[in-house]
Image (cartoon, rainbow, N blue to C red):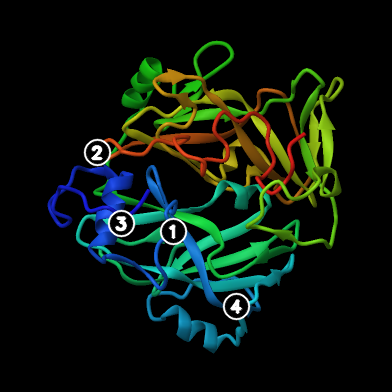
Amino acid sequence: MTLETSKQPVDAETGTGVWPAQRIAAVAAAGRIAAETPFDDDQIQPASLDLRLGATGYRAPASFLPGRKWRMADRLAEIGAVPFDMSGGAVLETGGVYFFRLQETVDLRKRESAFANPKSSTGRLDVFARLITDHGVQFDTVDEGYTGPLWLEVAPRSFNIRVRPGSRLAQLRFRSGSPPMGHRAVRELNETHGIIAAEAGEPVMRDGAIALSVDLAGDADGLIGYKSRPTAEPIDVDLRDAYDADDFWERLYRPKGSGLILERDHFHILASKETVAIPKGWAADMFAYDTLVGEFRVHYAGFFDPGFGYTGDRRDGAKIVLEVRAHDVSFMVDDGQVAGYVAVERLSAPTELLYGARAGSNYQGQSLALAKQFRRK
């Protein structure tokens, strides 16, 4: 979506909720979301903004948050982080912790805040990508009224990755106010629109969020997922359909009898039993980790944009890819076991751009799918 000014004055009071594409575009056009280089035409998503790496990276000895007293640049210097030039691209190695100042900066007002998540392809490559602000005390959180630069911590876990200035590993969602969505409201919304459709019966809910469970039945061939293979070959995050999946992944098939053992030192790609569809005027987020579901975690939270799982006004639904890693010890999961929860949130106004309405939507109508960098057979 190109940056076009909204008819509404950019600083006028807006409705409570997540900002739609046209609101992000209007605020950017007014200069309150700025960038070192011109915005890409497809950088604004239906209810979020893709974030781009800048020209300098830093390799650090550990992950950290700057804390209330520090700016990120000062803290990086204080801990001895080593800068490196990104102009020709760089390979980020597994086990390393890297920081980048992003090309985008924000100037938020009262009632305006933001939160971040890795992009879908980043999560499916098992790459930590966590947003940090100056004086920040939480990852992936831009506090109300924050003005300043944005930084990204990047830590590859399973594969080396190749990045360059402009690579997009994370996305930012803006919000006005703190709109509550109670248990009853979410249940009624789900009954009306089928946001999450279970195979049988009512979906499990807790604290106003809807559960997703693991599918170990698989497709007609019994394929249920993938397990990462050790390899030194880097994956270029900006390529599409470039790699043979079997060079990086072991295929997993329907277990006989008992469940699937998630091996502690491996990353797993599985799918949900349920299908998800997000209607116009709404957005959703998946929780990254829940200690109550067992000794494993859905490794990366996810944004679900309005229009995901729809073709026009028709609900098709799409399975959710689960990026799963055992937590501390190997853990066995069973078919239908709860893996995480999805929270639903209203947009401040209907978006003018729905997911799947242009070529940049890589996972519309997906079933079990690896990241966009791998060729689909």
What number is the disc on residue 87? Answer: 4
Marks 2 and 3: CB-CB under 8 Å?
no
Where is residue 267 shown, x and y percent of the image? 74, 47
| Residue underneath mark 1 | 40
In space, the residues marked 1 and 3 are separated at their CA atoms by: 23 Å
- Numbered tag placed on residue 349 in the rendering: 2
How packed is label 1: few (under 14 Cα within 10 Å), some, or many (20 or more)? Answer: few
Amino acid under disc 2: Ala
Give the image quarter of residue 47. Answer: top left
The image position of residue 7, as x and y in percent, is 16, 47
Q: Is residue 3 left or right of residue 14?
A: right
Q: Give, as a three-letter code, the residue at label 1.
A: Asp
Quadrant, the C terminus: top right
Q: In the drawing, does residue 351 fall left or right of residue 121?
A: left
Q: Which one is earlier in the sequence, the residue at label 2 or at label 3?
A: 3
* Residue contact between numbered discs 1 and 2, judged by CB atoms under 8 Å: no
Q: Are marks 4 and 1 in contact (CB under 8 Å)?
A: no
Q: Are marks 2 and 4 in contact (CB under 8 Å)?
A: no
